[in-house]
Amino acid sequence: MPRPPAEPLDLLLLPTWLVPVEPAGVVLKNHALGIRDGRIVLIAPREEADQLIAKETRDLSGMLLAPGLVNAHGHAAMTLFRGLADDLPLMAWLREHVWPAESRWVDEAFIKAGTELAIAEQLQSGITCFSDMYFFPEVVSQLAHKHGIRAQITIPVLNFPIPGARDADEALRKGVALFDDLKHHPRLSIAFGPHAPYSVSDDKLESIRTLVAEMDIGIHMHVHETANEVEEALREHGERPLARLARLQLLGPRFQAVHMTQVNDDDIALLVEHNCSVIHCPESNLKLASGFCPVERLWEAGVNVGIGTDGAASNNDLDLLGETRTAALIAKAVSGSATALNAHRALRMATLNGARALGLDDHTGSLEVGKFADLVAFDLSRLAQQPVYDPVSQLIYSCGRDCVRHVWVAGKHLLDDRQLTRMDEEQLIASAQEWGRKIGSKH
Ligand SMILES: CSC[C@H]1O[C@@H](n2cnc3c(O)ncnc32)[C@H](O)[C@@H]1O
Ligand SMILES: [Zn+2]
């Protein structure tokens, strides 16, 4: 039996089920999880934890305690463009609707309102860590810091002027400064976010490669999102985009390839050789009819795959649990095998694999002693979840995000019984509606 820790715990959680994700496939019944100074310090059978002193104890009967979900790809402030341009293919959506709307509306105030809305929606959806690929990363950092969530914030790079940077060189300079400001932050990390192979030239990618070698940070990029992207690259340059990135020496363990709906054997060999991660965004890929990422083939090859919602303008929500269910269902259809991406593996993709893709798996993504207490409690006691044979199956196949009851990030209780503890929900709704009126009246 472990000796009681000398100091009292800050918080002792008593869920019916505890799913650590690591080790894989384990469900612990009637166990306790103890938190001190924002970190998990104990996971033990409930009887052993009974002797411990805790400043606060929470009974989570009927609930499943899991690692917080990791939304490994998104464009947070695009919440304000939710539903603005639906039912279109990627390039028409982007060139004819989204890019014009961004050049008209995106400024610091837009980023603040849209990102706060996204942080609140993500907390309500059980997400404790998100990756953001959008504009004014310094504003996003301030907001993620203020609201207590964990985030990877990427430096946007395109070959044309963007909100917040006149050109790619200015974006890179600002990105390096932001990295210097945040390098010791316990919850925020910086990565480069070159938009896509078709929108960033070789010289800019080479600058990123040089900076990454010095800074040891991630590269997060939309890659092989559609068949058209690959066909055009072959026609114009005689090379697949991923092969071009390999030639430019951008691929490596910190490379996060978002989408990858077009994958041949050579692509898989490159992903394996360079130990890259793939971020799967099934609902955006379905809605824009972009294609299907072959997650089962990637899994068999040993490629790490995380999950992302993409932006709310192509999804149209930031519901990672729903996204995970979609991922599990289409993996079966795409591979022709009902055993593909089972519920435990799907949960791992939405937590630890996402954390690994973002280079954060030492800190978050599983319930292990020493990691930050980034947690979500799902309520399995309601009518639509009965009866419970396998709680993880129930979570993936029958729960919606309305099952999310509590969220903690680094031990801080950010969602308490479905209520945001540090954000004003009514004010967020009013602000989003005001932006909606403004944007809608000109669209
Ligand atoms: C610096 S990246 C921000 C840029 O990306 C656009 N965007 C949003 N979703 C997608 C997607 O699925 N594929 C390609 N580009 C996308 C967003 O609107 C910003 O302009
Ligand atoms: Zn995207």
Image (cartoon, helix red, strand yellow):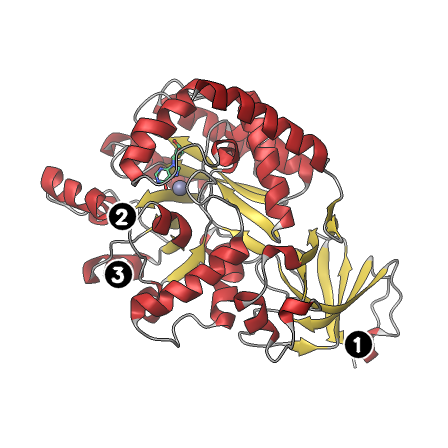
Quarter of the C terminus within the rendering? top left
Can residue 268 be seen in the rendering of this structure?
A: yes
Ligand 1 shows up in the quarter that is top left
Q: Nearer the viewer, residue 334 or 35?
A: 334
**Type of amino acid at the residue the image marks with label 2:** His
Picture quadrant of residue 235 = top left
Residue drawn where x is 64% and y is 55% of the image: 402
Q: Is residue 412 above or below residue 182?
A: below
| Dot placed on the residue nearer the N-terminal end, 1 or 2 | 1
What's the distance in space between the residues labelled 1 and 2, CA to CA? Answer: 48 Å
Query: As drawn, is 141 to the left or to the right of 33?
Result: left
Query: As drawn, is 84 to the left or to the right of 203?
Result: right
Q: Which residue is mark 3?
A: 268
Q: Is mark 3 within 8 Å of ligand 1?
A: no
**Type of amino acid at the residue the image marks with label 1:** Arg
Residue drawn where x is 64% and y is 47% of the image: 123
Q: Position of residue 246 (x, y in %)?
A: 24, 48
Q: How many marks?
A: 3
Picture quadrant of residue 102 = top left
Q: Position of residue 232 (x, y in %)?
A: 16, 40
Q: Position of residue 7 (x, y in %)?
A: 86, 61
Residue 224: assigned label:
2
Q: Nearer the viewer, mark 2 or mark 3?
A: 2
Q: Which residue is mark 1?
A: 46
Query: As drawn, is 158 to the left or to the right of 266?
Result: right
Quarter of the N terminus within the rendering? bottom right
Within 10 Å of disc 3 (Cα), the crowding (few <14, some 14-19, many 20+) is some
Q: Position of residue 323 (x, y in %)?
A: 48, 56
| Dot placed on the residue nearer the N-terminal end, 1 or 3 | 1
